Image (spheres, helix red, strand yellow):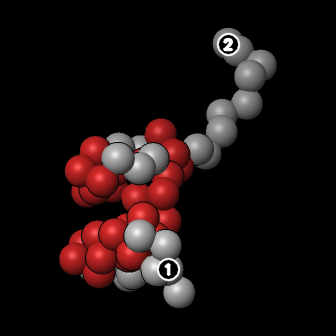
């Protein structure tokens, strides 16, 4: 038995939607997850926010 505590690490959970947005727009998965979270999981809005941020038009 190991003495290493189990960590509840949510970053290890695959997020296909975030991974696809990250790959499509050349951003990190963490940034894609942040955009999805900020846009209430609305993929179109998240992608729009990514584009606006890339163009320097983020609110």
CA–CA distance between discs 2 and 1?
A: 49 Å
**Residue at the image position 28 percent from the left and 45 percent from the top:** 23
Q: Quadrant of residue 43?
A: bottom left
Q: In the image, is residue 26 above or below residue 34?
A: above
Q: Where does the image place residue 28, in percent across and percent down from the top left?
A: 45, 47
Q: Residue 27: x and y, percent?
A: 41, 50
* Left-right relation of 40 to 7: left
Tell me if residue 37 can be seen: no
Residue 39 spot, x, y in % from top left: 39, 81
**Residue identifier under label 2:** 1
Residue under the image location 73 percent in, 30 percent down: 5
Looking at the image, the residue that sits furthest to the right is 3
Nearer to the camera, 9 or 22: 22
- Evaluate whether residue 1 shows in this view: yes
**Mark toward the start of the polypeptide (2 vs 1):** 2
Which residue, as the protein is rendered here, is positioned at the far bottom?
59
**Front: mark 2 or 1:** 1
Q: Position of residue 32 (x, y in %)?
A: 40, 59
Above or below — where is 54 with respect to 26? below
Q: State the quadrant of the N terminus.
A: top right
- Asked whether 56 or 48 is in front, the reply is 56
In this view, 50 is above or below 6: below
Residue at image position (53%, 87%) is 59
Residue under the point 77% across and 19% down: 3
10 Å crowding of disc 2: few (<14), some (14-19), many (20+): few
Q: Secondary structure beneath disc 1?
A: loop
Q: How many marks?
A: 2
Q: Which residue is mark 1?
A: 58
Q: Quick check: marks 2 and 1 in contact, CB under 8 Å?
A: no
Q: Secondary structure at mark 2?
A: loop
1 vs 29, nearest the viewer: 29
Left or right of 5 on screen, residue 12: left
């Amino acid at each position: 038995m190991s003495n290493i505590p189990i960590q509840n690490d949510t970053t290890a959970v695959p997020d296909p939607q975030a991974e696809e947005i990250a790959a499509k727009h050349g951003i990190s998965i963490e940034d894609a997850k942040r955009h999805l979270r900020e846009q209430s999981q609305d993929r179109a809005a998240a992608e729009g926010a990514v584009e606006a941020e890339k163009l320097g038009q983020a609110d």
